[in-house]
Image (cartoon, grey):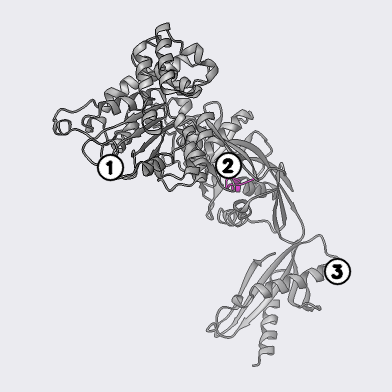
Amino acid sequence: MDKLTKGKKGEGLALDYLRKRDYIILETNYRNKIGEIDIIAIEGEVLVFIEVKSRTSTSFGRAYEAVNFHKQRKIINTSLIYLRDKGLNDFQLRYDIIEVYMTNRLKINHIKDAFCL
Amino acid sequence: MYSKISTCVLQGLSGHIVEVETDLSRGMPVFNIVGLADTAIKESKERVRSAIKNSGYGFPLNRITINLAPAHLRKEGSQMDLAIALGILISSGMVDYDQEDTVFLGELSLDGKLNPIEGALPMVLSLRDFKIKRCIVPYDNREECSVIDDMEIIPLRTLREVVDYLKGKIIIEPYKGMGEDSKEKKEYELDFSDIRGQDSLKRALEVAAAGGHNALILGPPGSGKTMAIRRLPTILPDLSLEESIEVTKIYSIAGLLKSKGLIKERPFRSPHHTISAVSLIGGGRNPKPGEVSLAHNGVLFLDELAEFDRRALDSLRQPMEDGQVNISRIYGTYTFPSKFMLVAALNPCPCGYYGDPYHDCSCSPRDIDRYLNKISQPLLDRMDIHMEVLPVKYQDLSRVRKGESSLEIKKRVSMARQIQLNRFKDEGIYTNAQIPNKLIPKYCSLSSSSERIMDQAFKKYKFSARTYHKILKVARTIADLEGKESIMDHHILEAIGYRSLRVKYWG
């Protein structure tokens, strides 16, 4: 299983997880000139930007550690452009991380409000 | 989505009410504090965020803007944490609160506990002047705030308690203090009876203590200068309530309040002679009181006076005269009180033995001059009592009989101080040393024979006008020690005696 398919599989699992919890999915793999956001969804009144990180083993560190400061800035800047393009000015915002561990037992860990400006 | 609550900041010793306005709006989840806040307040963001979460409330996902009004006033201190956290909780609808008569003070720790703050007493005192009815303070600050009886002091331990109190879930009675039972006597390890001989030195210190006069003690090493002065606090009269509040205010903003309640003993500060002018007078970017203010209503003891930096010594002149220091920095001009009693000790020459009948002095006259001239004439002028001590005689040292105990001396000193307090109760001063020049004729009138003595002394010693006033004040104190209504000849003679040393060494 190469990196790309592993990532895709993880994002698919995350999407199933969110749909089960009544998130309305707006975009997947949204892309603009600054960067990419894996999932953009709405939960109640809050617009949520979600970064999905997949791992097949924990021996190289936890998944959320990979979302460092620079990655966070990139996601935030990308989301600002998204908001401007779609004219979504009156939403509460939240940035989440979803960790997908595809080890012997599948495990999904949703970190709400993982970072902010 | 908007809320407004009050807290307090200090500028020097005076407090100002600050309105913490909080607005929650939709948009990027940012947390901004505007209104000239210093680093401690900017950092409160993180404390507030954790404290709110760890107290079991949700931290809102909105754009949070906090304004500290009035915007022109520079704010410092961590006491605003509580008001900021409450502002957020009220704006996000977790608490209902719309009164304006309560002021919130407190620093938050990450688990939501209220930590004690610096300067609680001066803040609460100025809030009383603003007619504030109720004040919420951290539990550990309750003792120092409880001196005020016409304001409700609500001591609380955690952010959760504050919220529950505002919701009416818990009822806290205003704190009234532990009452008078905290008035226990302090036991000193030192006592004047430890000193053998040196009666004139003890007498001089007694007069100085009774009138709050400055004293300069000069003598060879080992003659008991430092030993005697270290015992000075044991004969000083107790602080009155007003004096005690003044002292506690200063220690409160300096963050030196160790006991929780009011300071009951007179301060005794003895800085090392390497002290800088700034730490002596007070200063810093946000001015803090220096040693002169920390010695307010007490004693500032400078041992080895000639070793001090001359600049530091001369900076003492103005605070000694005015009883207050004005410290100007970019952030404002602060005034701290500095009515202290300066007691200084020094050797008569670099080797220490000049004038000692038992040792030879190895200094040249030039060395001695240079050494003594480190103390400027204006500073000498401000010392009311000059005293030379000689080494203790063997007969005194081996004598088994003990001298007077501190308790006996203190009794006389307190009596003399009481006479002064009664005399000056309408003048706004406490001691003879503080008599302003215009009141000297009223309180220190001389008989015609005393006038003649003064006249002769003036011709002989060439006193300055300030010295004349100082002599009158000291004579007044000596008369008070005897309980006499008017100043008599032997009082004035003793007072002149305390000024004659200058001619010998600085002539």
Q: In the rendered image, which quarter is residue B209 located in? A: top left
Q: Quadrant of the N terminus of chain A?
A: bottom right
Looking at the picture, which amino acid does disc 3 mark? Lys
Looking at the picture, which amino acid does disc 1 mark? Cys
Label 3 secondary element: helix
Residue at 49%, 24% in the rendered image: B466
Q: Which residue is mark 3?
A: A86
Residue B25 on image: x %, y %: 76, 54
Q: Residue furthest bottom?
A: A1
Q: Is residue A93 left or right of residue B275?
A: right
Looking at the picture, which amino acid does disc 2 mark? Leu
Count of marks, rendered view: 3
Q: Are marks 1 and 2 in contact (CB under 8 Å)?
A: no
Q: In the rendered image, which quarter is residue B345 located in? A: top left
Q: Residue B99 colored magenta?
A: no
Measured Cα–Cα span from mark 1 to mark 2: 61 Å
Nearest the viewer among B8 and B99 is B8
Q: Which residue is mark 2?
A: B105
Residue B231 on image: x %, y %: 31, 33
Residue segment shown in magenta: B75-82
Measured Cα–Cα span from mark 3 to mark 2: 44 Å
Residue B494 on image: x %, y %: 34, 19
